[in-house]
Amino acid sequence: MEETEHTHTHTNTNKKCVAKTRSFRTNYHHKHQDHQHHLHPNHFFLQHSNRTNTFWNHQNQYPTCYPPALLPLPSLSPLHLTPNPPLLQNHNFLSKTHLHKSPLKQNNLPQATSSDTHLSVLPAINGQQQQQATLISRNEDGRRATATKAQALLPARRPDSGGVEGQVIPLLANHFLVQFDPSQKVYHYDVKITPNPSKEVARMIKHKLVQDNPVDFSNTLPAFDGRKNLFSAVEFKNDRLEIFISLPIPIGKSLEGANDLEEKHQQVKLFRVDIKRVSKLDGNELSSYLSREGDDWIPFPQDYLHALDVVLRESSTENCIPVGRSLYSSLMGGVKEIGGGAVGLRGFFQSLRPTQQGLALNVDFSVTAFHESIGVVPYLQKRIEFLRDLSQRKTRGLVGEERKEVEKALKNLRIFVCHRETVQRYRVYGLTEEATEDLCFEDRDGKKLRLLNYFKDHYNYDIQYRNLPCLQISRSKPCYLPMELCVICEGQKFLGKLSDDQTARILKMGCQRPRERKAIINEVMGGPFGPTSGNYAEEFKLNVSREMTRLTGRILQPPKLKLGNSGHIRDLIPSRHDRQWNLLESHVYEGTRIERWALISFGGTFEHKSKVPKFINQLLQRCAQLGIFLNKNTVIGPQFESIQVLNNVCLLESKLKKIQRAALNNLQLLICIMERKHKGYADLKRIAETSVGVVSQCCLYANLSKLTSQFLANLALKINAKVGGCTVALYNSLPSQIPRLLRADEPVIFLGADVTHPHPLDDFSPSVAAVVGSMNWPAANKYISRMRSQKHRQEIIQDLGAMVGEILDEFYQEVDQLPKRIVFFRDGVSETQFYKVLKEELQAIKAACSRFRGYKPPITFVVVQKRHHTRLFIDETDMSSIRNQLFDENIPPGTVVDTVITHPKEFDFFLCSHWGVKGTSRPTHYHVLWDENQFTSDELQKLVYNLCYTFVRCTKPVSLVPPAYYAHLAAYRGRLYLKRSDYATLARGTSMLSRAAPPKTTPLPKISENVKRLMFYC
């Protein structure tokens, strides 16, 4: 990283940008260059182009070298599989004692012999995806070249033309059809600029090159991704270009040798630009792929799609702030302050996708937080609580943890100075150890100068905050800037964790009802900064529709539900429009008996504590109404502790163990009431579930002042689920609904898996993986969990085989046989990771099954995605199929879409299983990567939708299939176990000026035997 980041202005109108060009055509073969742009087998069936990081320029003033203005200040190739792939490196569960122990029941599991533990090539079932395939590669001209045949692991193909069950509903989707000319060649050039510039400068250089050298660039308008890739619709005159360009860059000097800092300096910086042709891309393969013609094993032409994606982003990037695949601008509704030194900015997301209707541009409304562009001192006053009165206490300094917190808040921010005229930008690497009044430096003559005297002598400025440290703006040498003379640069995404208030304000900014969101998206498509602006699309013969895609969805019928036998109402069909049901005259399907429980309070006023007896009494009544037995007598009287106990881990543990001893080490439930949200919540959960061995239910005193029937019911449902009960079951079991595949005497296990990663600014904490599995059949509404910590930010689940093996052991002990089928729901996987996850995790599941002699159940592997940008709206123009439907309402629960906007070949669908109360509903995307069970579209969609009604915490269908939902909750619980661990201490103690390697991953604490088979995480 450079010590400074420059934006440029042309301050001397008499100086002109000088460009010297040297070009030549060569006939050599670009073998090395072509190879790195070919589709590697590991790219598989990616649907999106690689993420491009471009920069924002509000004024398109490249001809005069003006800087980007700031906002106002105050599928791919098949895989080769080895014939006998070994067990995954981390799946050494054959040596683990707990998997060799005899089950609790008399009938032991059939263990595989050592020879059985080696996986053979994944079997093909009735023409399943793994088969002999002809591999396709490209030569330097983009032509296809046939390679040898090999075993290939390919995604599941759609088994039919889509489902047919359900009432038809006309819909609009925020996908915009993109028509392209298959005969249009795209020429890909590699760009190397020396010295390596910032992205802003790189774009300025590109614009200047094209403007000053039209002949060399064949009078075209090439698209540039701001890094190394340049795409042109016409071949350049020469295959290689070497151009020298000089740009005037006004700069100022640093405090190292700063005796003449006040003078303005004009540096004419010389850049060398090497441009080399990499390949010629053809649109015929993309056209063939989208039309679903020809060989299924032809890899998806990712390189051509990536080129078109860069083209369609080029104009928007010049006028907006790019963040990932989204672009933000103050022109889309202004800047809204959300507190804590952050502002919210509106923007839009865009991405090219292959769909059944052809190539489509997915455009959606987006909101995110940026750092507020204000002075560093007022920024700190807004962001850090203990500095709120800094302007009234200018003599204040920073001590101990205060300095570390300030350094953490400012690290890596870009700033500029306000005591002199300059466009120079700096990056904050840390704070000085000394206060500003103690800092000195040597000028060029070796004379030692005090920083305070320097600013007084050169700028006639008296430093006000003399006891604060200065900003360190160099990674290696002393370069100091006083905080009060620095301003936060605009356009920097806020990477810190948002507070609850900030999150609420951001969500409110992005919470639009369907009609409003649809209008915003349509405005983007026709606006001056959207993907249809500029001339780039026309240059590449692209025609982007400005009309949303019209399609028909289907509304699946809700399942009939079974409730407790002792209630007045024992079964029901959710008939409300939101598909919710109540339990006013009903019992939960399986209510538990809680004989031994206790209550502990942390903090609270005398008035708060006086409400505890009433709370206990009303909770007892509500539990009884729901068919849950809660003993009216606690094992020990309510324990009232100071909230400070939550700050002392040892003291907290001793208090909880005291309560457990009072219950003769057989406590079933601990209810914890807190005065307010507290970071000690993580310690409480970890100690209770690992050291003490009891499930806990926490609530706030603020909720006790209301004690509504809804609050008490929600609390009772969670308590019942945690101690072994369940809320509801399907009246018509899954085997009766899907008789072709499922049978009551052939159990099926539903597995869910997720990985949670630490905060973006956390470079040390491990990731946490969780796997859950259903333990009863055919109800399939109770799940156990297994959790593991793993390498920092690793997405592949490292110990998946071991965790699945443990869950299969538990299933056998509960059901008396191993599951005949496995349905695996994997959450948190992006499309770029599909292939790697399938390759490694499917093999891990098969490795877990191979522990048992002759056990090879068919497996269905489904990726579950919530973080996508497809939105569905009711089509107001089609009134024929709509009755009693308000157009500003969300699509109804059960809406499923598996045509038009889904993948052209693979097995995927969108299902909105919940009712959207606020904003616009986000359907869940289910993408089947592997399907040995051979579900039809109707069967799998019905299965998923029915499971969404069995979630234990509420009386409505949830938006995510429960196995994936539970896995997410379990992974979050594992993250809590690490929240107060040594990782945080290590991160704080590490120098802020260097990015240390993550420490060795420490395993999660072992969950107590009393708890591990319960749904303690829900």
Image: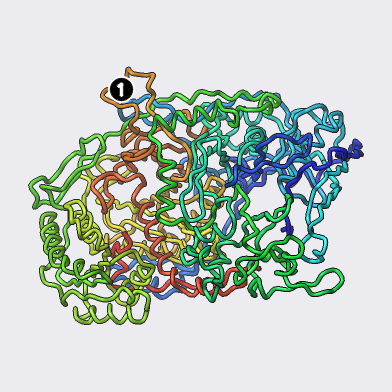
Q: Residue at x 54, y 57 (%)?
A: 379
The answer to whether residue 516 of the structure is visible from this angle is: yes
Quarter of the C terminus within the rendering = bottom left
Secondary structure under tag 1 reads: loop
Q: Nearer the viewer, residue 564 or 134?
A: 564
| Among the 4 quarters of the image, the one containing residue 945 | top left
Left or right of 333: which side holds 416? right
Residue positioned most to the front: 460
Quarter of the N terminus within the rendering = bottom right
Q: Nearer the viewer, residue 182 or 517?
A: 517
Residue positioned most to the top: 880
In the depicted structure, whether residue 960 falls above or below residue 538: below
Give the mark count.
1
The residue to which callout 1 is attached is 882
> Where residue 755 sits in the image (x, y, percent)?
46, 58
Q: Nearer the viewer, residue 499 or 683?
A: 499
Q: Nearer the viewer, residue 144 or 261?
A: 261
> Where residue 71 sits in the image (x, y, percent)?
60, 42
> Where residue 57 sits in the image (x, y, percent)?
67, 39
In the depicted structure, whether residue 562 falls above or below residue 813: above
Disc 1 marks a residue whose amino acid type is: Ile
> Where residue 915 sits in the image (x, y, percent)?
31, 39
Left or right of 661: which side holds 236? right
The answer to whether residue 117 of the structure is visible from this angle is: no
